[in-house]
Image: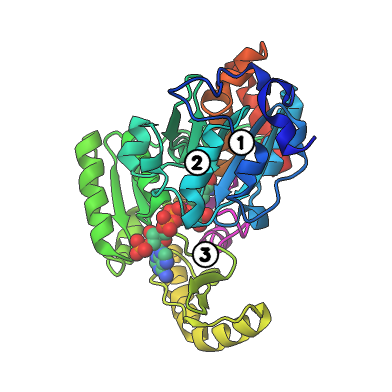
Amino acid sequence: MGGDALRGEGGARGRGSRLRGNDDAKLPPMATLADLQRWLDNPLPAEAAERALLSGSMGESPSKYSRSPAMWNAAFRDVGLDAAHAPFDVRPEHLAGFVEAARALPGFMGSNVTVPHKLAIMPLLDEIDPIAREIGAVNTFLLAEDGRLIGFNTDADGLIASMLRPLPGKAEPFLPSLDGRDVLLLGAGGAGRAAAFALAREIGGGSLLLTNRSPERAADLAAQAAAATGASVSAVGQEEVLAAALRMDVIVNASTVGQSGVRRLGGGEATSLEAFSSLAPASPAVVADDGDEAAFRREWFAQSADAVAENNARSAETIASCKPEAAFVDAVYSPDETVLLRQARLSGRKTLNGKGMLVMQAAFSFVHRMTRRHLQAAGLDPDALYDRVVAVMAEAF
Ligand code: NAP
């Protein structure tokens, strides 16, 4: 079925039931998949036209790396919802056009939002949930029944659930509780902000210490999280953090340090963070990138080897002196094991990567946010589906 066939009541199953008509002055005219496709750099998959409902993951190039379509489509199949989840590759100058086409597309449910649109999308939405407003970033938006677009942030739920609820295949949670724990958080970007407010709400009489490459962001975030939660939250510089780590019960990385892949910086330059531990300062070389990845890596490695060696040595020395029972958590899920987690595991500490966080935040969004009203309309009980959706998404990851 082509995109134009989706217009009006003759559209894909279920799309004709939407309360949206060209004669309704308050709502924009109906859009088609062709209207949505105009704003995308990747072709929509065939399932987008074959299913009654459409959701997706929107970022600069999720079609190249995102695990979300596989996870969400597996969950849709499992619960029997006639829905598809597509990657939406949207460049910044196409964001507003994409949002308006999505708003007017019959059967559109909502979308995950990733780099670089988590902030830029906020003024384009009709409502921002208080948690997302506090964090200052949206990672999910949904199309409500009345046509409003509502932004949320489910990263906090995902992080805390991955630490405190048993993951699929595990009898016990990673940690029984965060109450009274001293926690070190590395990073104050979008994920770091979500983690800071969420951790501050879980630590009770414990403490939360933040650090970030740009120290003013950590200081601002510490002040905001302390004011919002009443918890003991403070910030230190990247150099002081190595000594502070020794008294910590839990160390959480929410920075991009340790993440795989080439980080293209524009202007024909790129760098890479995979070889570094997020616990110690990381200063990778920035080198020319003409799209030949092997050539980039040879030059990058030659120029960064000393910095990697110093970073790894300082991190290893610190981890070797941390509490034996200290637990290490990384929001990064690619690679499976970052340098931080490898050093922690090799020195006998408990470790948890970001896969659980990604799965738990997606399951939370599936059950409580983006898909909730569609599950209910199909006669399903969303709350009863949570554990099953977690298991299915984890398997499909
Ligand atoms: P972001 O908003 O771009 O923030 C990047 C963070 O990394 C900032 O704190 C930044 O510090 C820091 N950073 C970048 N380069 C650095 C360097 N060379 N040395 C030290 N710090 C550096 O990104 P994000 O959305 O927060 O994502 C952070 C990571 O979390 C990513 O790897 C992402 O994949 C992961 N994540 C995972 C999940 C999940 O579900 N598992 C969810 C969300 C995010 P500055 O402030 O100084 O720039």
Classify mark 2: residues with Cα within 10 Å, few (<14), some (14-19) or many (20+): some
Query: Is residue 305 magenta-colored?
Result: no
User: Residue 258 — which label?
Assistant: 3
Residue nearer the viewer, 326 or 367: 367
Residue found 80% across the figure and 34% down from its top: 1
CA distance separating discs 1 and 3: 23 Å
Residue displayed at 47% across by 81% down: 286
Instruction: Give percent across and percent down for residue 357.
Output: 54, 42
Which badge, 1 or 2, comes first in the chain's sequence?
2
What's the amino acid at mark 1?
Answer: Leu
Residue with the mark numbered 2: 99
CB atoms at circles 2 and 3 under 8 Å apart?
no
Disc 1: which residue: 167
Label 3 is placed on what type of residue? Gly
Q: What stretch is highlighted in magenta?
A: 329-355
Disc 3 residue crowd, few under 14, some 14–19, many 20+, Cα 10 Å: many
Q: Position of residue 378 (x, y in %)?
A: 67, 14
Residue that protrudes farthest toward the top in the picture: 379
Badge 2 element: helix
